[in-house]
Image: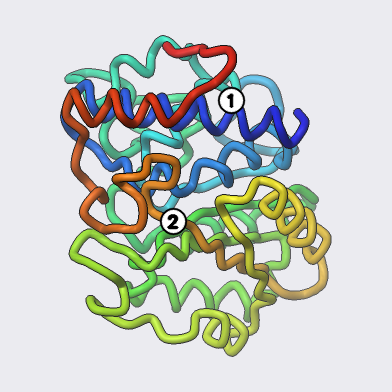
Amino acid sequence: MTTEQLQDMATQVRRDIVRMVHKVQSGHPGGSLGCTEFLTALYFSVMERKPGFDMDGIGEDLFFLSNGHISPVFYSVLARSGYFPVSELATFRHINSRLQGHPATHEHLPGVRIASGSLGQGMSVAAGAALAKKMNKDNHLVYSLHGDGELQEGQNWEAIMFAAHHKIDNLIATIDYNGQQIDGPTDAVMNLGSLSSKFEAFGWQVLEMEGNDMTDVLAVLATAKAATGKGKPVCILMKTIMGKGVSFMEGTHEWHGIAPNDAQLADALSQLQLAELADY
């Protein structure tokens, strides 16, 4: 896909997000909208993926979603990149659906490798999977995505230290650095300080990325990929705007976990226009 085609796909994914959350009046639109460019670029351009889905993931790149509450964007990207029918997005958060509020392996949904309802665990899983690839002499990469707020959990820093100590240099961990979490700005809830200084002190290579600029997302992911294999895990601090693309949702924690009403949905969709719509 060209950069323009990727951005069009991101817009379609944003339409999916607001429609999915509106339909069941439940879910997390804010962080989902903010991470749309990243996941669209990853699945449609960056990762080396095999057709179909194999839980072992041997001979292909892997992705782990740690901040599982942004399942709307994850499900949309998985469906539109071929893991399951796009029509299944209409079952989001329904009873007995494979598309539960937080991704889980129990439903056997293709593309989902871990349950990520509890925050703070994805770094440990990603580090373990990347180390397994090195031990198996599989030269593919492991990508992961984490919320900045979940870095307030101590388990992350144990895994961050572990990855550097074991030179797990096939791991690219991206932090959604939007400065918001469910109870308010991260600076007010528990100030994270300088994440770049912290990751560097723990022995990681750190890159910064404008997460809502598709051109920069592609460029920095390429730089991150080139930095692998050099003895250090790679961290990308991805600056995003929570609620990006829908004006009344942007930049506030208030849309972390609430759904738009009918009028708000219509407003959101009017802002997310495409020449050719492919709504489910």
The percent coordinates of residue 128 (x first, y second) are 55, 59
Q: Which mark is residue 144?
A: none
Location of the N terminus by quadrant is top right
The percent coordinates of residue 233 (x first, y second) are 67, 70
The percent coordinates of residue 23 (x first, y second) are 22, 21
Q: Is residue 181 above or below residue 91?
A: below
34 vs 21, left or right, is: right
Residue appearing at x 27%, y 27% in the figure: 265
Residue appearing at x 37%, y 31% in the figure: 17
Please, what secondary structure does the residue beneath circle 2 have? loop
* CA–CA distance in space, label 1 to label 2: 31 Å
246 vs 239, left or right, is: left
Between 116 and 224, the residue placed more toward the observer is 224
Q: Nearer the viewer, mark 1 or mark 2?
A: 2
Please, what secondary structure does the residue beneath circle 1 have? loop
Q: Which mark is residue 241?
A: 2
The percent coordinates of residue 45 (x first, y second) are 72, 36
Q: Amino acid at mark 2?
A: Ile
Residue appearing at x 72%, y 67% in the figure: 169
Q: Is residue 242 above or below residue 178?
A: above
Name the residue carrying label 1. Answer: 53
Check whether the beta carbons of the residues at disc 1 and disc 2 lie within 8 A of each other. Answer: no
Q: Amino acid at mark 1?
A: Phe
